Amino acid sequence: MKPQVTEKNFFYIFLAVVAIAGIVILWPFFTVIVLGASLSVVLHPLYEKIKKNITGGVSWIASILTTLLFVIILGVPLFFLGSTVFVQSQEMYNSITHNGGASLYIQKISTSVAEILPDGMAIDVEKRIGEVASFLSSSATQIFTSTITTIFSFLLVLLSLFYFLKDGKQWRDMLIEMSPLPDEYDQKILSKLSRAVNGVMKGYLLIALVQGFLMGFGLWIFNVPNPALWGVFAGIASMVPSIGTALVAIPAILYLIIKEDTTGALGFGAWALILVGTIDNLLNPVVVGKNIDLHPLIILFSVLGGISLMGAIGILVGPLVVSLFWSLLSVYKEHFK
């Protein structure tokens, strides 16, 4: 018996060491794997329809078509937005070079900011702009590297999505087979986790649509060009924690200031900060909690905790971990208590 016990203990220790080494190796791609797996769960019904009605049951072709459709849905608005930003940047550059240079616009911004601020407060706008320009200049290499890294990560997400769609069922069956729990429990846990992923992703998508609509509507009210296109971008940006819709709001406020529309800048700033900026905090716990059958307060703390511990991906991982814990408690209550 002793040799068997020793062999078993050695195997467990060796398994733990290899598992830890595997986690360490894969950890840099944790965000990519989570996003790829989550997107595959959301897009799986579409994949099944394409596989059944278009590809005649050929899974790899259905996976490619589903991934391409996802890229098109996401990429078309970004392409038009990029084209608009490029054209407007050229127009602004031409306007600056033909109307007294950048100093005139800086003076306009300084005047508008002075009108907005209470008496006794002052901001050296020219100095602040110089600091921002200096920071951007010194960080050009880092910004370029981050951009390349983001593009590479996005490509890896698409590759992961393809394989999760194509081989997801096999991996699911493999997990069930390797699990020491009875298949009934495994099926229940995985089913609840799948519903949680769907609920979280669809909940965030709904919130993004609401924020994008509100931002676009506000831009239209305050006469900022291309409000619909910028609203779409605001919806996409709203899913980035800490930054979110500020990517659209701040340039829009600067645009209104340059146009010497101080009232509009103040009004839109209030709209973006009070309404658009806080609506996600109100909707997030309710919408996501309803989709995954958890109390809104638990969802709120799981999102905040996830972001605090893991950064941007925590907005997805936090609720999923709590939902998994809740599912395990449910299984324990029904089958072990």
Image (cartoon, rainbow, N blue to C red):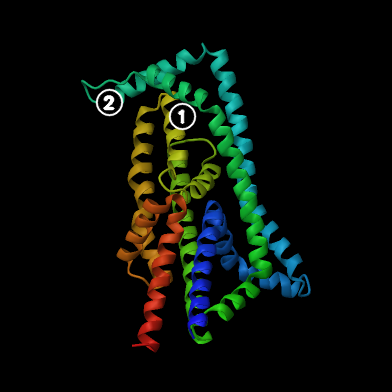
Instruction: Give the residue pinned by disc 1.
Output: 255
> Dot 1: few (<14), some (14–19), or many (≥20) neighbours within 10 Å?
some
Q: Secondary structure at mark 2?
A: loop
Q: Nearer the viewer, residue 43 or 193?
A: 193
Marks 1 and 2, the one that precedes in the sequence: 2
User: Which mark identifies residue 117?
Assistant: 2
Measured as percent of width and height from the top left, residue 209 is found at 49, 55
Measured as percent of width and height from the top left, residue 298 is found at 32, 65
Q: Nearer the viewer, residue 307 or 26?
A: 26
**Quarter occupied by the C terminus:** bottom left
Mark 1 and mark 2: span between their CA atoms?
18 Å
Q: Disc 2 marks which amino acid?
A: Leu
Q: Is residue 141 above or below residue 291?
A: above
Tell me the residue at 40%/15% (across/down).
107
Q: Residue furthest left?
A: 120
> Dot 2: few (<14), some (14–19), or many (≥20) neighbours within 10 Å?
few
Residue 34, can we see it? no
